[in-house]
């Protein structure tokens, strides 16, 4: 009878430990999911406010190209002016 009682006690203790481990895993997963969700919410807010990185980079690239075009147009104008002066001589 005592041997049966020990087996039952060991089985109950094993069951309790298993349940505690499962509950701990669920709690850990839930909290990790919440932290991840908060990070995603923050990232989404940033994207809504500032735009995504490729879009920001594209805007920067467009501005740089526009500046280059303006500089080239100015240079072309200077060259035309110089050529006109040479042709007048």
Image: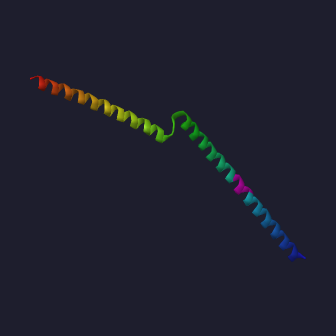
Q: How many marks?
A: 0
Q: Where 65 falls versus 35 (above or below)?
A: above
The magenta stretch spans residue 42: no
Q: Nearer the viewer, residue 42 or 32?
A: 42
| Left or right: 87, with 69 as reference point | left
Left/right of residue 15 with respect to residue 76 in the rendered view: right
Seen from this angle, which residue lies furthest left? Answer: 89
| Left or right of 74, for residue 36 | right
Of 52 and 70, nearer the camera is: 70
The image position of residue 29, as x and y in percent, is 67, 53
Image quadrant assignment for residue 9: bottom right
| Residue most extreme to the front | 87
| Residue shown at 56% from the left, 41% from the top | 43
Against 34, residue 75 (above or below) is above
- Residue drawn at 58 percent across, 39 percent down: 44
Q: Which residues are magenta?
A: 23-27
Q: Position of residue 47 (x, y in %)?
A: 54, 38
| Main secondary structure found in the magenta portion | helix
Q: Position of residue 16 (x, y in %)?
A: 79, 62
* Image x and y of residue 66, in percent: 36, 32
Task: Say which residue appears at 85% left-offset and 71% top-offset.
Answer: 8
**In the image, residue 34 above or below residue 87:** below
Q: Quadrant of the N terminus?
A: bottom right
Give whichever of 72, 33 is nearer the camera: 72
Quarter of the picture holding the C terminus: top left
């Amino acid at each position: 009878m005592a041997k049966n009682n020990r087996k039952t006690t060991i089985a109950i203790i094993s069951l309790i430990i298993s349940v505690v481990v499962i509950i701990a895993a669920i709690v850990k997963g839930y909290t990790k999911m919440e932290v991840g969700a908060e990070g995603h919410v923050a990232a989404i807010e940033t994207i809504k406010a500032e735009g995504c990185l490729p879009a920001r980079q594209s805007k920067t690239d467009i501005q740089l190209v526009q500046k280059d075009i303006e500089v080239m147009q100015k240079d072309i104008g200077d060259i035309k002016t110089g050529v006109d002066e040479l042709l007048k001589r």
